[in-house]
Image (spheres, rainbow, N blue to C red):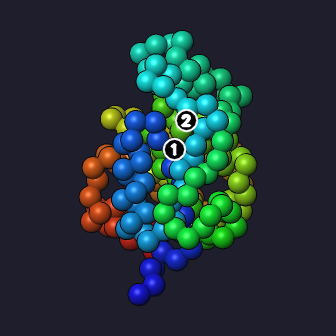
Amino acid sequence: MASMYADTVVCYFSCTGNTRALAETASKVLNADLFEIVPEEQYTDADIDWHDSNSRSSIECNDSKSRPAIKTLKPVQGDNKAFDVSKYDTVVLAFPIWWNSAPKIMWNFVEQNDLSGKTVVVICTSGSSSISGAEKDLKARASKSAIWKRGSRFTATTSESELKKYFDTVLK
């Protein structure tokens, strides 16, 4: 039986595994290919210490020109060996919220990939921050003809049924 979400890909960035768990569940619910956005330089626990204003992530978040290099988009699930955004109609972006925005590696992703005419859905993990700043920041850097759907914040343990309900609503 074909999925109602044909030609969908979930691309995620995760340091601690929380967003990976959410992306894996989303990929399963959507019967979508799954790709991990792998940074050129991996993040350590010290790099993502938001209490330290000198941590790598703090410095990146405070620098609007920062664009951490993407080493690769590693296939996790799906038939594709190499990532090619042109193969998809819908792109789901999953990431943690850092300082009320998307990590700068996600800015890099939307700037490097032509999302023209694509339906884009943003899902994130965060203990308390809203997704609105992240959506605004990514939208400003992506193709103007991308079709953005309302994003949402979830936990790593969000159930398949909860994600299915969300995607059924936003991807009608």
Quarter occupied by the N terminus:
bottom left
Q: Residue at x 31, y 46 (%)?
A: 155
Q: Identity of the amino acid at label 2?
A: Pro
Place of residue 57 in the rendered image (x, y in percent of width and height, measured from the top left): 54, 24
Q: Residue furthest front?
A: 81
Q: Residue furthest bottom?
A: 1
Mark linked to residue 76 = none
Place of residue 10 in the rendered image (x, y in percent of width and height, measured from the top left): 51, 59
Q: Nearer the viewer, mark 2 or mark 1?
A: 1
Mark linked to residue 13 = 1
The answer to whether residue 113 is left or right of residue 59 is right
Q: Residue at x 41, y 15 (%)?
A: 51
Q: Identity of the amino acid at label 1?
A: Phe
What residue does disc 2 label?
103
Q: Residue at x 66, y 41 (%)?
A: 70
**Label 2 with label 1: CB-CB less than 8 Å:** yes
Numbered disc 1: secondary structure: loop
Residue 24 shows up from this direction: yes
Residue 50 shows up from this direction: no
State the image quarter where residue 159 is shown.
bottom left
Place of residue 109 in the rendered image (x, y in percent of width and height, measured from the top left): 65, 46
Instruction: State the residue in front, 69 or 79.
Output: 79
Q: CA distance from mark 2 to mark 1?
A: 9 Å
The answer to whether residue 48 is left or right of residue 118 is left
Answer few, some or many: residues within 10 Å of disc 2's Cα (few below 14, many 20 plus, some between 14 and 19).
many
In this rendering, the count of numbered labels is 2
Numbered disc 2: secondary structure: loop
Place of residue 162 in the rendered image (x, y in percent of width and height, measured from the top left): 28, 61
The answer to whether residue 57 is left or right of residue 17 is right
Disc nearer the start of the sequence (2/1)? 1
Above or below residue 149? Residue 14 is: above
Quarter occupied by the C terminus:
bottom left
